[in-house]
């Protein structure tokens, strides 16, 4: 019996849909000075990747909490905005500003609630 090696597949740090990339490019063109809070570069130790022509930068502290996440742009009758599907999140705040991972550590360091009745 011959043993076949399987290619090693690793979970990408984050993925970005084409619709999210297009929206990011549009927003960056509208705010060339980064007025919407887009970073214009990385800091030492940051992880960098480019997806659909958009430069993504993740700090090393956040990377384990975001591994495998997908960023999408949703524009429907019900809602319009960025949607982040994070497979690491086991609980989240209703406002979307914080989430918990299985170990119980709060990934965003958000401890004061969001004013919408959220206690995370």
Image: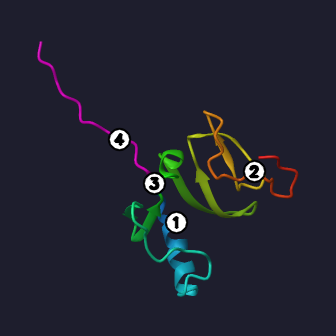
State yes or no: discs 1 and 4 in contact (Cβ < 8 Å).
Answer: no
Q: CA distance from mark 3 to mark 2?
A: 21 Å
* 10 Å crowding of disc 2: few (<14), some (14-19), many (20+): few
Give percent across and percent down for residue 109. 66, 52
Q: Residue at x 50, y 72 (%)?
A: 22
**Which residue is tagged 3?**
60
Q: Which mark is residue 19?
A: 1
User: Left or right: 2 with respect to 22?
Assistant: left
Q: Residue at x 52, y 65 (%)?
A: 19
Give percent across and percent down for residue 86. 57, 46
State yes or no: discs 1 and 2 in contact (Cβ < 8 Å).
Answer: no
Q: Earlier in the sequence, mark 3 or mark 1?
A: 1
Q: CA distance from mark 1 to mark 2?
A: 32 Å
Label 1 sits on a secondary structure element that is helix
Magenta includes 5? yes
Closer to the camera: disc 1 or disc 2?
A: 2
Closer to the camera: disc 2 or disc 4?
A: 2
Q: Which residues are magenta?
A: 1-13
Q: How is the image coloured?
A: rainbow
Q: CA distance from mark 2 to mark 4?
A: 32 Å
């Amino acid at each position: 019996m011959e043993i076949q090696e399987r290619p090693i597949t690793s979970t990408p740090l984050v993925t970005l849909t084409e619709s999210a990339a297009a929206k990011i490019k549009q927003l960056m063109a509208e705010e060339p000075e980064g007025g919407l809070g887009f970073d214009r570069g990385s800091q030492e130790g940051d992880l960098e990747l480019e997806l659909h022509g958009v430069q993504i930068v993740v700090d090393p502290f956040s990377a384990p909490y975001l591994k495998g996440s997908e960023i999408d742009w949703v524009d429907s009758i019900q809602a319009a905005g960025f949607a982040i599907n994070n497979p690491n999140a086991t609980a989240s705040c209703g406002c979307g500003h914080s989430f918990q991972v299985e170990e119980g550590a709060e990934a965003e360091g958000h401890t004061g609630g969001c004013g919408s009745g959220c206690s995370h």
